[in-house]
Amino acid sequence: MLGIVLVAVGGGIGSVIRYLVSNWMAERFGPEFPFGTLLVNVVGCFIIGLFLTMTTERLSISPYWRLLVAIGLIGGLTTFSSFSYETLRLLQTADALRAFYNVGLNLGVGFFATWLGIGIARLF
């Protein structure tokens, strides 16, 4: 039961952060490109790479922290379903170039951020 509560709490926090970041990015850069989704996906990739590497290779922590952070917080923060929907909407509005950029940036920069997080965690 504690595991479910931790995932729910982390997911709630991650979802609120995603909402705030998405709104902030849309206000700052406009709604034409989903910069908020891109940012939370890249940051989430970095955090999960860093956190899981640190907690599996460097630190001994309670598995409850993994539930709270990796599954809850990062699961609530990152937005593959939003990414998919926004990409399809770009395609439906005949904006194939932005759809291509959205896919490329989320995957390419996301993989790089995960790799970077793992690399930084292994330095410690």
Image: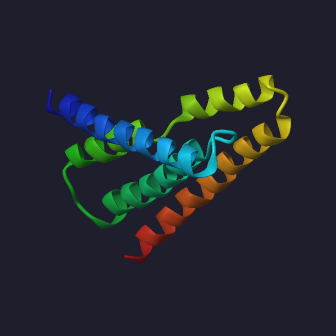
In front here: 74 or 32? 32
In front here: 36 or 55? 36
Which quadrant of the figure has residue 3? Answer: top left
Q: How is the image coloured?
A: rainbow
Where is 108 relative to 7, above or below? below
Which quadrant of the figure has residue 1? Answer: top left
- Residue 8 drawn at (x, y percent): 26, 31
Where is 86 relative to 52, above or below? above
Where is 28 relative to 87, above or below? below
- Residue 120 drawn at (x, y percent): 46, 71
Residue name at image x 50 percent, y 69 percent: 119
In front here: 23 or 41? 23
Q: Residue furthest top?
A: 92
Residue name at image x 31 percent, y 58 percent: 55
- Residue 6 drawn at (x, y percent): 21, 37
Classify the position of the C terminus by image quarter: bottom left
Residue name at image x 56 percent, y 52 percent: 28
Count of numbered circles in the view: 0
- Residue 76 drawn at (x, y percent): 39, 36
Q: Residue furthest left?
A: 2
Residue name at image x 84 percent, y 41 percent: 97
Where is 89 relative to 54, above or below? above
In front here: 10 or 64? 10
Decide if residue 90 is on the left or right side of residue 110.
right
Q: Residue furthest bottom?
A: 123
Decide if residue 106 is on the left or right side of residue 98.
left
